[in-house]
């Protein structure tokens, strides 16, 4: 029964993604700023009449002036800084919680090549007390680089659940995350609950679109996803089935700074919130939710102290992979 569901799922996804890519572009162009969606800015003075003279001039100027595009390369080394899944997933049972795992194929390419899509059963990594610092909603070009600077200074790896529209807007920051050995996870394309949670298909469409943005920049795509808003009232059992069947693993959190709550706690309160969630018997696996975009300056201020006391308590710092235990 599960195999039949999976076959139908992939057939539908194939049809959708190969047949409706134009349609999804239309939708996304409505969702995100035009300059991000198209790479161009719209001329507000356009009156609807073709201006062939100025178009021709612009094109000529472009061909004369535009330097050849040099695509930045990634410096992270496969095998040392990250692991790439084997075609048959046979190398995924890792014993190291500090190395991110990616796929060189999109879900799509796996399906076209007849490779397995759903992940095999993997024993969770529980060898040591491990904290997984996770940062959602980036990358931006202000807060995320500050977070990366702190992680670098502390010698700590973390996990960034990124949104596709932020990736498209800040590719250099994504590349930096990857080069510095952090794990990159998928957090939908535009974080718009109304669209993402219209149906499991809508959710998966955004995940796949975000994978494409990520893979364009770093050459690989994640297996890990985090549902915007977390699992629960919107990300229900049908969404879990969809994510599983498509070979992704969703992780929520068990500790948070509450940095995205309306009260916007300051750095000191954020540290206290982490202590509150850890409680008197801190869990062996801590998945700590923070954010790295917008106005999260207090998160940046709180981060060094959070790292220091977790380290003092004996936690190792890991990155989320398909082997990471669920936080509950
Ligand atoms: Zn989010």
Image: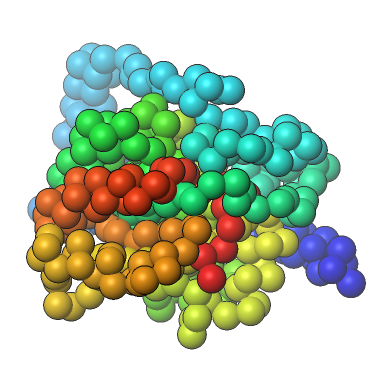
Residue 228 lies in quadrant: bottom left
Residue 278 lies in quadrant: bottom left
Q: Return the x and y of residue 139 as percentages of the image width and height.
A: 29, 47
Using residue 60 as the reference point, say whether residue 207 is left or right of it: right
Using residue 159 as the reference point, say whether residue 113 is left or right of it: right
What residue is shown at x 67% (from left), y 46% (from top)?
108
**Quadrant showing the N terminus:** bottom right
Between residues 190 and 19, which one lies in front from this camera angle?
Answer: 190
302 relative to 318, above or below: below
What residue is shown at x 68% (from left), y 62% (from top)?
244
Between residues 285 and 295, which one lies in front from this camera angle?
Answer: 285
Q: Return the x and y of residue 110 as percentages of the image width and height.
A: 73, 42
139 relative to 296, above or below: above
Q: Return the x and y of residue 298 as percentages of the image width and height.
A: 12, 58
158 relative to 19, above or below: above
Using residue 193 as the reference point, say whether residue 12 is left or right of it: right
Identity of the residue furthest to the bottom in this view: 233
The number of numbered discs placed on residues in the rendered structure image is 0
Between residues 319 and 314, which one lies in front from this camera angle?
Answer: 314
What residue is shown at x 60% (from left), y 46% (from top)?
127
Q: Is residue 267 visible?
A: yes
Between residues 278 and 301, which one lies in front from this camera angle?
Answer: 278
Q: Return the x and y of residue 266 as percentages of the image width and height.
A: 10, 65
What residue is shown at x 79% (from left), y 46% (from top)?
116
Q: Is residue 52 visible?
A: no
């Amino acid at each position: 029964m599960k195999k039949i569901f999976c076959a139908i799922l992939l057939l539908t996804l194939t049809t959708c993604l190969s047949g409706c890519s134009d349609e999804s572009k239309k939708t996304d162009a409505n969702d995100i700023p035009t300059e991000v969606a198209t790479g161009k800015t719209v001329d507000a003075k356009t009156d609807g009449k073709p201006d062939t003279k100025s178009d021709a001039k612009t094109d000529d100027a472009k061909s004369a002036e535009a330097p050849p595009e040099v695509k930045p390369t990634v410096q992270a080394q496969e095998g040392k800084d990250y692991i790439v899944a084997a075609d048959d997933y046979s190398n995924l049972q890792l014993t190291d919680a500090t190395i991110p795992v990616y796929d060189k194929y999109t879900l799509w390419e796996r399906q076209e090549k007849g490779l397995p899509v759903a992940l095999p059963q993997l024993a969770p990594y529980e060898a040591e007390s491990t904290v997984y610092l996770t940062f959602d909603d980036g990358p931006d070009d202000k807060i995320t680089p500050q977070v990366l600077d702190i992680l670098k200074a502390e010698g700590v790896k973390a996990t960034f659940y990124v949104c596709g529209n932020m990736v498209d807007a800040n590719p250099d920051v994504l590349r930096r995350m990857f080069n510095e050995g952090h794990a990159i996870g998928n957090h939908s394309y535009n974080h718009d609950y109304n669209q993402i949670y219209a149906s499991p298909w809508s959710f998966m469409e955004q995940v796949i679109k975000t994978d494409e943005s990520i893979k364009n920049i770093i050459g690989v795509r994640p297996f890990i996803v985090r549902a915007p808003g977390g699992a629960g009232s919107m990300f229900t059992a049908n969404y879990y089935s969809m994510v599983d069947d498509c070979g992704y693993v969703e992780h929520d959190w068990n500790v948070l700074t509450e940095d995205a709550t309306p009260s916007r706690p300051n750095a000191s309160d954020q540290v206290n919130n982490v202590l509150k969630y850890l409680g008197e018997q801190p869990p062996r696996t801590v998945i700590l939710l923070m954010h790295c975009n917008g106005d999260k300056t207090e998160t940046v201020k709180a981060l060094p102290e959070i790292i220091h006391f977790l380290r003092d308590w004996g936690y190792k710092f890991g990155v989320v992979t398909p082997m990471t235990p669920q936080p509950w």
